[in-house]
Image (spheres, helix red, strand yellow):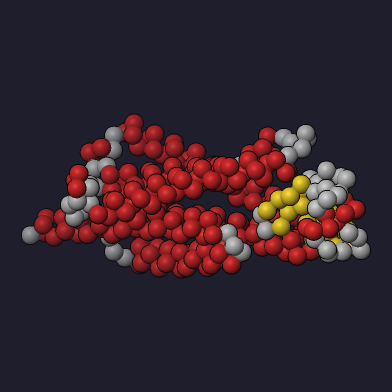
């Protein structure tokens, strides 16, 4: 891979204004990452049971693991497209970066499997018709709706839902009503679509890096990659709107930051492309 030192408008301490913006975005993403870890731990308290295997544990932290993989990939892309010069890419460094990239793909692939498993679990939920939530109050269940959880007992069962149809999730730890199940299914599909869209964006970026590394800055393939990224980013903005609609403002904020973070990588690629073309003109002259 080839990086470039990219000239930017100078700012205090020798960092360009664009780099300050990226620093702020990346820092905010790290803050949000801490929240996701806590959120996974909170969900674990309501979904854990003694029969869990290794995959159950890793699935419980699928979001945190997924974020970790994307963080490392974002860091690698920043190194490749902006921070490191051509001379910095020694054989050892290239191997180390490619190894880290493979690990990240495995972690993200695990998230895809975990989200698919969640969809299967929801489809396997046991339906109970013509009943009340209070009938389940002594079964050590947690009631969920829209990613919020409550330990179900005789004092809150009538307040949590007045519905007559309920679903006990496949692992037998969580219950929700029909309205809650619709939301759970929507959220599960959003998680799956989101990670697949991000993988599509990553594929387009990797394609651009690969071509520009070989001095190719124009052509149909690069044009398709740029157009595809725009379309995929549009899908992500729709997901941002959905998160806001469901009242998950932090998720919407986090998604927006990730989009900005990868748009910054796109800006690095554009700047790199300009430098390649300028160098080609100098050589031709």
Q: Is residue 93 left or right of residue 159?
A: left
Quadrant of the drawing holding the N terminus: top left
The mark tally for this picture is: 0
Q: Residue at x 88, y 45 (%)?
A: 138
Q: Residue furthest left?
A: 285
Q: Is residue 38 above or below residue 261?
A: above
Q: Is residue 52 above or below residue 118?
A: above
Q: Residue at x 42, y 49 (%)?
A: 28
Q: Is residue 67 above or below residue 282?
A: above
Q: Residue at x 52, y 63 (%)?
A: 240
Q: Is residue 180 above or below residue 102?
A: below
Quadrant of the drawing holding the C terminus: bottom left
Nearer the observer, 144 or 284: 144
Residue 207 in sight from this viewpoint: no
Q: Is residue 180 left or right of residue 130?
A: left
Nearer the observer, 210 or 62: 62
| Relative image position of residue 45 (x, y in whole percent) | 70, 40
Q: Quadrant of residue 218?
A: bottom left
Q: Is residue 245 left or right of residue 210?
A: right
| Relative image position of residue 158 (x, y in whole percent) | 84, 58
| Relative image position of residue 230 (x, y in whole percent) | 42, 67
Nearer the observer, 149 or 215: 149
């Amino acid at each position: 891979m080839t990086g470039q030192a990219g000239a930017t408008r100078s700012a205090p301490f020798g960092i360009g204004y664009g780099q300050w913006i990226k620093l702020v975005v990346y820092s905010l993403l790290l803050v949000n990452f801490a929240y996701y870890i806590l959120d996974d731990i909170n969900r674990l308290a309501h979904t854990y049971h003694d029969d869990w295997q290794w995959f159950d544990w890793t699935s419980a932290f699928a979001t945190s693991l997924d974020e970790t993989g994307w963080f490392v990939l974002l860091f690698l892309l920043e190194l490749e497209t902006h921070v490191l010069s051509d001379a910095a890419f020694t054989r050892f460094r290239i191997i180390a970066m490619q190894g880290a990239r493979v690990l990240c793909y495995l972690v993200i692939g695990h998230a895809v499997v975990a989200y698919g498993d969640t969809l299967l679990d929801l489809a396997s939920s046991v339906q109970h018709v013509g009943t009340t939530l209070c009938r389940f109050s002594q079964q050590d269940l947690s009631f969920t709706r829209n990613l919020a959880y409550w330990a179900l007992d005789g004092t809150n069962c009538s307040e949590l839902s007045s519905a007559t149809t309920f679903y006990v999730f496949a692992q037998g730890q969580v219950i929700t009503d029909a309205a809650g199940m619709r939301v759970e299914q929507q959220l599960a599909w959003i998680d799956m679509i989101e990670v697949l869209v991000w993988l599509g964006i990553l594929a387009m970026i990797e394609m651009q890096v690969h071509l520009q590394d070989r001095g190719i800055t124009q052509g149909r393939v690069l044009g398709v990659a740029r157009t595809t990224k725009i379309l995929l980013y549009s899908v992500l903005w729709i997901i941002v709107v959905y998160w806001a609609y469901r009242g998950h403002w932090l998720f919407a904020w986090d998604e927006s930051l990730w989009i900005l973070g990868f748009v910054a990588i796109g800006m690095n690629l554009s700047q790199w492309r300009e430098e390649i073309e300028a160098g080609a003109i100098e050589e031709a002259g």
